[in-house]
Image (spheres, rainbow, N blue to C red):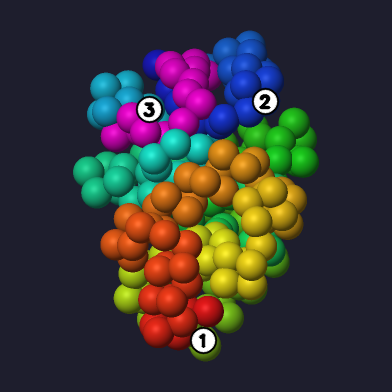
Amino acid sequence: MPTRIVIFEDNLRLRQSLRILLDGIEGYAVCGDYGNCDDAVAVVDEQQPDVIIMDIDMPGGVNGIEAVKKIRAFDQHVHIIMLTVFDDNGNVLDAICAGASGYLLKKYLSARLMDSIQEVLSGGAPMSPGVARMVIASMQKHPTFKENKYQLTSREREILAALSQGSGYKIIAAQYYISVDTVRSHIKNIYQKMQVHSQLEAVARARDAGIV
C-alpha cells in the first residue's frame, strides 16, 4: 500500500507542484489537495491519510493550527507536517503544541520534503535547532504557554498587537508576509474568540487582559 498524503496549501501553484512531485514517486499517493482547512476534519476522516502536509497560515474560517487541533481531537496517529515561511515564528511553536509532528520551511521544500516525510513515518519530528530552542525556552519560561484567557494563537496575538498600534490590514499583511485575506481571517477568528464585534472592542479587551 502506498503512503497516502493529503495536502492543505492555499497557494495553488505550490499545491499543484507538491501533488505532481509526490504522485511521481513510487510508494506515495496524494489522495486530496485543498486550498483551505474548512473541511479538514471531514477530509481526514474520509481519506484516512498517513501524512498531512499543511500550511500554517490558511485563509477561510479555520487556519492550519486550528485544523491540527480539530484533527487531533479524533486522530492521534496521522503525521502532520506544517509548512512555514520562517522558523522563528511563534506560530510554529503553537502548531507543535497543537499536535503537529514537525515542520518544514517552504524554501527547503524541494530538498527536504521526502526526508521529512520519511522522518515522521519513522517516528521522528523534523524540526530546526531554532524551533527546538523555542520549545525549550517556552517550557522553561512559560510553563503555561498554551493558556491564555481567549486561547489566541501567537499569530492572532501578533495581529492584535499590530491593530492596537493602529496598523491597517495591508501593513499587517506585509509585516508578516501573509495575504490581506489571511489577515481578515485571523481577525475574524480573534473577534469570535474574544466575543467582540469591532477592532476597538477587541483592543480594549486585549489591554484589559494584558495581551497587548
Amino acid type assigned to the residue bearing label 2 in the image: Leu
Answer above or below: position of 163 versus 81.
Answer: below
Residue displayed at 46% across by 82% down: 207
The numbered dot on residue 179 is none
Identify the residue under disc 3: 49
Identify the residue under disc 2: 14
Amino acid type assigned to the residue bearing label 1 in the image: Gln
Q: Secondary structure at mark 1?
A: helix
Answer above or below: position of 72 versus 37.
Answer: below
Residue displayed at 53% across by 79% down: 212
**Pointer 1: residues within 10 angstroms few (<14), some, or many (20+)?**
few
User: Based on the displayed image, in which of its 4 quarters is residue 147 positioned?
Assistant: bottom left
Marks 2 and 3: which is nearer the front?
Answer: 2
Q: CA distance from mark 1 to mark 3?
A: 35 Å
**Front residue (pair 124, 36):** 36
| Residue 210 placement (x, y as % from top left) | 45, 85
Marks 2 and 1: which is nearer the front?
Answer: 2
Q: Tell whether position 34 is magenta.
A: yes
Q: Earlier in the sequence, mark 2 or mark 3?
A: 2
Q: Tell whether position 121 is magenta.
A: no
**Front residue (pair 64, 30):** 64
